[in-house]
């Protein structure tokens, strides 16, 4: 198995984990278990949506990304600011204020992801027009959504729009232009994405739809945000004109922004992973009709709600609308960007049956029957006390060999009560039966000691402290 196939950037900070079960209740793919007082993230189930980061009261879930110091690893660096970066600042009236600040911070050049978003919007309009009979199409811009579909909704993979994400398009164009401008080799140029979310960190290392990403490193908006503040100049006479994005590109930062660039009313735009799951289930069941396009953003409010941002998602969305109010619709066209050789995916996204129980259909069927039988033994409370999010999930873990029925506190309590009752009955019988032969008495004593040891394995000491055979 490719070790990067299930790359994730959301990690556990074990020293901060208190063993509570908030995270297992909020994870949309049931990728977290709590055992021995600590959470554990299952790589192949995790889609890097970051919901556990937001829900953990102890800040034990973190996103791993690159420090800004990575710019020192290259001779020439290009910053790729996500359009959601602009929405972090109050009273921003000109995107050039942020772009110029990035140069003062130490980058050699900038290329807006929002500019690439306008190219992706144009390519999307053309593709949908040519393949209208295959609609509805699902946006492929959010890596968490693609990863979710890849592991849970295989029938919807063919509906993914096979077009590169704006950040990838931006990276390819930025590198090509930097090479032409400087004469440097590709590896001497650093393409640094300033990201609002952890899923794009994983995407840069293990992309879907293409073999290798043109992004070299990913830094967080929340780290860049305070560093840019002292470099921001609001006197426009001091600014170089660097922005080449219009309303469509910058609008991609908020939910509904991508759909607005298609110039169609037959779309659905959903944000937040819980809402996305509901939409995907309805798409799979063919309950949604008349749609041409489905825009899905794992973060609440769109990219402005990413876990690596600083501003409230809905305030940031309002700021974006105010910022683009007087912008032209679009400033970028595919015909004007010869550096972009291909805007479409080069590889297919394949179904990864990580939730399948067995390696064959027959084995899976038997294991599913075992899961049903085990689930029926549990109380159906989905309390999470066992460390798994639901009773059925615990049953699946047991069938996989990763848990035992005694992990359920209710089953454990029943087993303890049953063992205690057996020991008591045998002890009474042992004291009341003087007619037992020596051999029978020894066997009975041995059985009582075995039951007592079983009881002790559950953490329950014997009543006398010396053993109940006396």
Image (tube, rainbow, N blue to C red):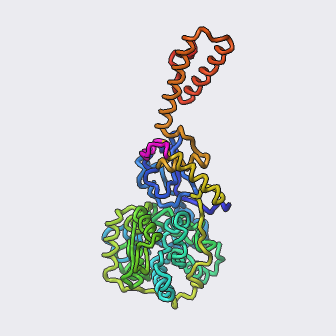
**Is residue 66 depicted above or below 181 in this figure?**
above
Q: Residue at x 62, y 78 (%)?
A: 346
Magenta residues (range): 376-385
* Image spot of residue 457 (x, y percent): 57, 29
Residue 227 visible in the displayed image: no
Q: Residue 177 location in percent, x, y?
A: 57, 82
Q: Residue 26 at what x, y percent from top left?
A: 43, 54
Give the prevailing secondary structure in the magenta stretch.
Answer: loop
* Quarter of the image where the C terminus is located: top right
Q: Nearer the viewer, residue 399 or 169?
A: 399
Examine the rendered structure and indicate whether residue 207 appears above or below residue 418.
Answer: below
Labels in figure, total: 0
Q: Nearer the viewer, residue 256 or 110?
A: 256
Q: Is residue 406 in sight in this rendering? A: yes
Look at 34% across and 70% down and name the residue there. 317
**Residue in view at x 68 percent, y 60 percent:** 1
Q: Is 437 in the magenta? A: no
Name the outermost residue toward the front: 435
Residue at the top extreme, as displayed: 434
Residue 186 locus on image (x, y percent): 64, 76
């Amino acid at each position: 198995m490719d070790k990067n196939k299930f790359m994730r950037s959301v990690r556990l900070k074990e020293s901060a984990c208190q063993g509570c079960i908030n995270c297992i209740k909020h994870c949309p793919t049931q990728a977290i278990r709590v055992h021995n007082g600590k959470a554990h993230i299952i790589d192949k189930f995790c889609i890097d949506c970051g919901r556990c980061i937001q829900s953990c009261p102890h800040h034990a879930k973190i996103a791993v990304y690159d420090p800004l110091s990575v710019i020192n690893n290259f001779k020439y660096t290009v910053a790729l600011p996500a359009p959601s970066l602009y929405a972090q600042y109050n009273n921003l009236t000109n995107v050039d204020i942020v772009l110029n600040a990035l140069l003062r911070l130490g980058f050699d050049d900038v290329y807006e992801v929002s500019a690439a978003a306008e190219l992706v919007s144009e390519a999307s309009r053309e593709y949908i027009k040519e393949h209208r009979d295959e609609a509805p199409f699902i946006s492929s811009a959010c890596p968490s959504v693609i990863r979710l579909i890849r592991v849970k909704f295989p029938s919807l993979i063919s509906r993914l729009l096979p077009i590169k994400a704006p950040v990838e398009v931006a990276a390819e164009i930025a590198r090509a232009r930097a090479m032409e401008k400087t004469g440097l080799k590709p590896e001497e140029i650093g393409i640094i994405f300033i990201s609002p979310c952890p899923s794009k960190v994983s995407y840069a290392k293990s992309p879907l739809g293409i073999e290798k990403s043109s992004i070299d490193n990913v830094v967080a908006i929340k780290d860049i945000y305070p560093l840019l503040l002292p470099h921001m100049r609001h006197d426009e006479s001091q600014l170089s004109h660097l922005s080449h994005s219009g309303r469509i590109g910058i609008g991609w930062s908020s939910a509904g922004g991508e759909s607005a660039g298609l110039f169609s009313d037959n779309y659905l735009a959903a944000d937040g992973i819980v809402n996305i799951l509901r939409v995907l289930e309805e798409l799979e069941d063919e309950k949604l009709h008349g749609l041409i396009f489905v825009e899905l953003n794992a973060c609440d409010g769109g990219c402005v709600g990413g876990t690596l941002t600083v501003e409230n998602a809905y305030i940031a969305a309002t700021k974006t609308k105010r910022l683009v109010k007087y912008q032209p619709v679009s400033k970028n066209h595919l015909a004007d960007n010869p550096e972009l050789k291909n805007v479409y995916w080069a590889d297919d996204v394949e179904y990864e049956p990580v939730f399948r129980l067995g390696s064959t259909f027959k084995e899976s069927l038997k294991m599913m029957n075992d899961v049903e039988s085990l689930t029926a033994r549990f109380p159906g409370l989905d309390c999470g006390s066992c460390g798994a999010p639901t009773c059925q999930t615990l049953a699946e873990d047991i069938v996989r060999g990763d848990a035992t029925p005694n992990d359920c506190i209710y089953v454990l309590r029943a087993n303890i009560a049953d063992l205690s009752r057996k020991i008591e009955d045998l002890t009474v019988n042992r004291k009341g039966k003087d007619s037992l032969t020596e051999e029978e008495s020894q066997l009975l004593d041995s059985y009582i000691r075995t039951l007592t040891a079983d009881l002790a394995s559950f953490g329950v000491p014997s009543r006398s402290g010396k053993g109940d055979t006396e």
